[in-house]
Image (cartoon, rainbow, N blue to C red):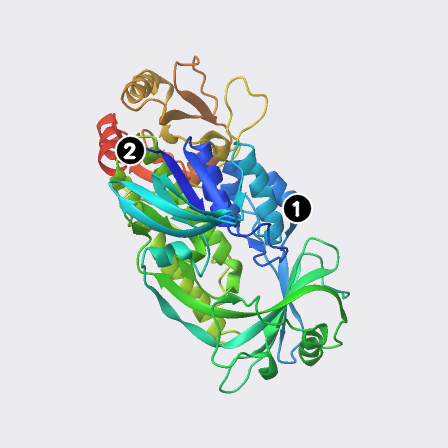
Amino acid sequence: MNKTILVVGAGPVGLTLAAELARHGAIVRIIDSRTERSPHCRAIGVTPRTLEVFEDMGVAREIVDAGLWITGMRALLDGRPPADMVRDLSDLPYGGLGIPQYATEAILEAHLASYGVVVERGVTFAGLQQSEGEVLVSLERPAGRTVANFSHVVGCDGAHSAVRKALDIDFEGEAFPWDFMLGDVRIDWDLPRGFSLRAIKPAEGGPPDIFVAVPLPERGRYRVSMLAPERLRAPGGTEHGIQSDRPGATLADLQEVADRLIPDPPKLTGMRWSSIFRISMRLAATYRVGNAFIAGDACHIHPPTGGQGMNTGIQDAYNLAWKLALVSRGRASDGLLDSYEAERRPVAMDVIERTTQASVNLGSEDTKTDQRLEDTQVLVAYTNGPLSIGPDGDDVVAGDRCPDAQGLRRSGFGFPLRLFDVLKGTNFVLLITAQAGDIGSIERLGENLRERFGGVVRVVAILPAGTSVADPFGITIIRDEAGDFAATLGGQEAEAWLVRPDGYVGLYMPSWSEGEVVSYLTRNVRLKT
């Protein structure tokens, strides 16, 4: 059987999926109908949780260097004095970043190439047939149509996904009855670097008049968005997303809105591109049909409020990749793949609901004020998912994102480590809080797990500050020298967390048991021994 996985679509979601599949040891091909990357900035915001994903992948530094930190927002509400709101995320590993989508794609594509995988451009997905656990895919090139065989196919091909349509998956929902316009322009004003601007004038019986400017990394450049005037709207509405077949807005169109909503309005110049776009709210009825899957905008579309779209899609890919790689490599049975939809579809439902309500209530006095972490995505959890096993607790339990902890020490290292350093990689990591006298039994646990599962699980013992033990065989010893691990995760003696390859706690045990670990990996994760 052909073990190659086909990824359709080389946007941020498809590139993340392909790179993660390759990092986890799977064989992958990726195609895109476009002959080159889009020059439009499209998605800009990268959430703190997505930066954690990029750190694990090994591209966080490049992404951060190409972007700028989004540090606050200036709000102009219906003639009131400007209100500057600073966003303090200093208690998280990362803040919120702004980087144009084309730069994100360039970095991810170069990262993918480091695994020997090159995007096959100018290749269009033209249909599929499934039989006996394989997928036959028709591929259209300028030279003609060919048919190729794959073990699995994943459609990361956007809101108008050809893969979703070929699978006959319903994509129900509705659209806002208004058109919007975008522009990439230069603005010379006193807005602090890293600040966005939102000017709103509520309207009776209709959407508010808005002007939103999101900073780009280049000095003085912003992506602006606003309602399109009646003369630019398409009769009867259009499909979701940027309408490349329609003329974009002019610089004068954008300036007209700025003049209307911003006191002492700045001059907009140097427009590089503009577009008309439409917003829909839709959710796929299922994320899987046989050995074919969809991810990202192919599954869910919603208003851009809070910059959730691309980030939700990237985390779809991050969730699916390790599972699909284990199944493709024969290390886990097919049932593991059902957990992808079970975990990720509820996340999309929540994002659609929140972003729709935020858009409808834009400028309303009834909107919530305590939203500091709401759009960071660090609160996303799989507590009720099929891979989350263990009792409730006061701190970090099954289904939670494993938080970072600092000030950890390891023998032979002349510098402190973070918990994320310890977790980095493609394995499950079993964290056990212990005393020096427990190391012998934990060492035997590590040996037994290696015999059953090979290198799928690493065992890490977390010891109190100042504890000295001989370096054991096959497990990692970490000292909680600063006490941050105990403060963050709880850290009672013999407490244990089995952290999945995507950084979520799969199994939580108030007191560790080898039998529970083995049962979880074989029954829930469906690992083969």
Q: Residues within 10 Å of mark 1 (few under 14, many from 20)?
A: some
Residue 401 seen in render: no
Q: Which residue is mark 1?
A: 66
- Location of residue 109 by image quarter: top right
Q: CA distance from mark 2 to mark 1?
A: 38 Å
Q: Position of residue 36 (x, y in %)?
A: 60, 50
Q: Residue at x 56, y 42 (%)?
A: 108
Relative placement, left or right, of 446 versus 402 is left
In the figure, 191 relative to 381: above or below? Answer: below
Relative placement, left or right, of 409 versus 384 is right
Q: Amino acid at mark 2?
A: Ala
Q: Residue furthest front?
A: 143
Residue 159 seen in render: yes
In the figure, 420 relative to 47: above or below? Answer: above
Residue 473 vs residue 136, the one in the foreground: 136
Q: Position of residue 252 (x, y in %)?
A: 72, 76
Q: Amino acid at mark 1?
A: Ala
Q: SS class of the residue under badge 2?
A: loop
Return the mark for residue 332. Answer: 2
